[in-house]
Amino acid sequence: MSINFSNSYRDLGEAFSQNILPDPVAQPELLLWNESLAKALNISFTNTFNATTNKEQENDLLAQYFSGNRLLEGSKPIAQAYSGHQFGQFNPQLGDGRAHLLGDIADAQGQRWDIQLKGSGVSHFSRQGDGRCALGPALREYIMSEAMFALGVPTTRCLAVVMTGQSVYRERPYAGAIVTRVATSHIRVGTFQYFAARDDVESLKKLTLYSIKRHFPALISASDDKAINPEQVLAFFSAVLAKQIPLVLSWLRVGFIHGVMNTDNTTISGETIDYGPCAMMNDYNADTVFSSIDRNGRYAFGKQVNMMQWNMTRLAETLLPLLSGDEDERVAQLQPLLTQFHQDFEQGYLVMMAAKIGIDEPIEGDASMLNELIALLKKYRLDYTKTFTALTASLSGSAIEAPLVDALNEWLPRWHARIDDFKVAAQQLMRKNNPVVIPRNHHVEALLERCQESDDLTELHQFLAVLRQPYTLLDDTTKYQDAPIDGDKGYHTFCGT
Ligand SMILES: Nc1ncnc2c1ncn2[C@@H]1O[C@H](COP(=O)(O)OP(=O)(O)OP(=O)(O)O)[C@@H](O)[C@H]1O
Ligand SMILES: [Mg+2]
């Protein structure tokens, strides 16, 4: 099997991670293999398999590798150390309690990707946990991240799901599984906090330099890549902030609620990570929360940008020792960047929402028109996805049906007047920005239930095929477009264990 691993994170030294092998499982069985992702990553088996290898043998070998039972050549697994603010409370000692980073690989364009097993056994960071993952949450991560990728949301992805043949106990026994996650890195805000909490400035410098090289190489010249200066630290912070804006904007565009935006679940690369308690919004309400542990609505749909700014402020704090001047001067260098973040986000939000109603370059008056629409969505409890799909279709003659047409009857003429001169272009823009299908909670949950009861994955593949083309109406799309009759009242998500 040809995967050309580096172990660059492990090479940072023992302060950063624990060297530890995945814990072998009883009976690994490949459930899902993401062929298109494998291709994109340049992962191929041509050296391993020959004309006489059959599909079953191939899958068996993949199951061995992606359960951690066999180690891929060149991989030196580690569990990464990190801390994190969880619902506002700082926990200095988190880290990969059930994950193993196998190493990083380069794709054909030279982009590096981490390959990580999740659910692969305990580590130094496991605390009370068993190091394992149940099948439901593993499949959920695969489905949601594939859907998000196709929706155009920056995200970590899944390469494989392997059943372990072992039960995991979560109040009752469930089938266990291991998911292979791919990310441009697994460096979290909490990774920086880990070293800041220990006053380990040398490691903070090393981590910042590594992060710059990995994610923002333009900030550093090849000749002086051994140390960083305060200007580079500020440029790094700006670059991290800039990554979070398209991330949160795309969540808001498609109605995604992350559910657990703790600093340990916020990557510096701006990729969605940790699909534990996430959910999709149905009818529009900025206060929407589904996570059972988010009792105060800290991570509600409409609060996500504020929470991201809060997380970025925690990142800023960790960078203070790397700046110059006294304490006040250091804060004064970071503060304007956080203010700028909010302004850039607000501007980006207007552009994003305007695109959803077909306007490429918003002008004065568009913000108030959008606010009015959002107020109507909320007042009449209109489904977010369906509303924009109907508005898009209406531009080529589809009638907007009741009750939507009644709810929007005063708003529609205002919108038509604005886009009348460029209806065709408006509709094209809307088609790109408004999915016709999203991974609705009730469909995801129903499928997870069925997959746990039966080995037949036909429906799962059908659902995935639809989710992989969320801007196109396929024959099967209509099966998954419906909003739940009760608006998901009483639906609760749980932190994915
Ligand atoms: N079953 C488990 N065994 C050991 N540690 C666990 C388990 N479940 C969660 N943890 C640890 O608890 C912390 C918080 O968990 P959280 O649910 O945010 O992350 P996760 O889903 O395990 O991983 P990730 O953020 O990488 O997707 C992490 O340190 C995680 O490793
Ligand atoms: Mg997590």
Image (spheres, rainbow, N blue to C red):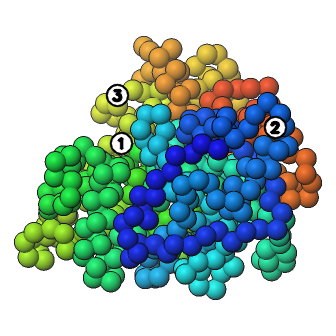
Instruction: State the residue at coordinates (29%, 62%).
Output: 208
Tell me the quarter of the image containing the C terminus.
bottom right
Tell me the quarter of the image containing the N terminus.
top right
Q: Position of residue 460 (x, y in %)?
A: 81, 44
The foreground one among 418 and 279 is 279
Q: Is residue 296 visible?
A: yes
Indicate the amino acid at tag 1: Gly
Instruction: State the residue at coordinates (32%, 65%).
Output: 207
Q: Look at the picture and state if 363 lies above or below 342.
A: above
**SS at circle 3:** loop
Q: Position of residue 352 (x, y in %)?
A: 43, 38
Q: Earlier in the sequence, mark 1 or mark 2?
A: 2
Q: Earlier in the sequence, mark 1 or mark 3?
A: 1
Q: Quadrant of residue 328?
A: bottom left
Instruction: State the residue at coordinates (30%, 72%).
Output: 203
Q: Position of residue 23 (x, y in %)?
A: 69, 71
Residue ID for mark 2? 53
Q: Is residue 435 visible?
A: no
Question: As drawn, is 494 to the left or to the right of 319?
Answer: right
Q: Is mark 3 within 8 Å of ligand 1?
A: no
Q: Quadrant of residue 478?
A: top right
The foreground one among 243 and 226 is 226
Q: Look at the picture and state if 235 lies above or below 323.
A: above
Density class for disc 1 (Cα within 10 Å; few <14, some 14-19, many ≥20) is some
Residue ID for mark 3? 361
Residue ID for mark 1? 348
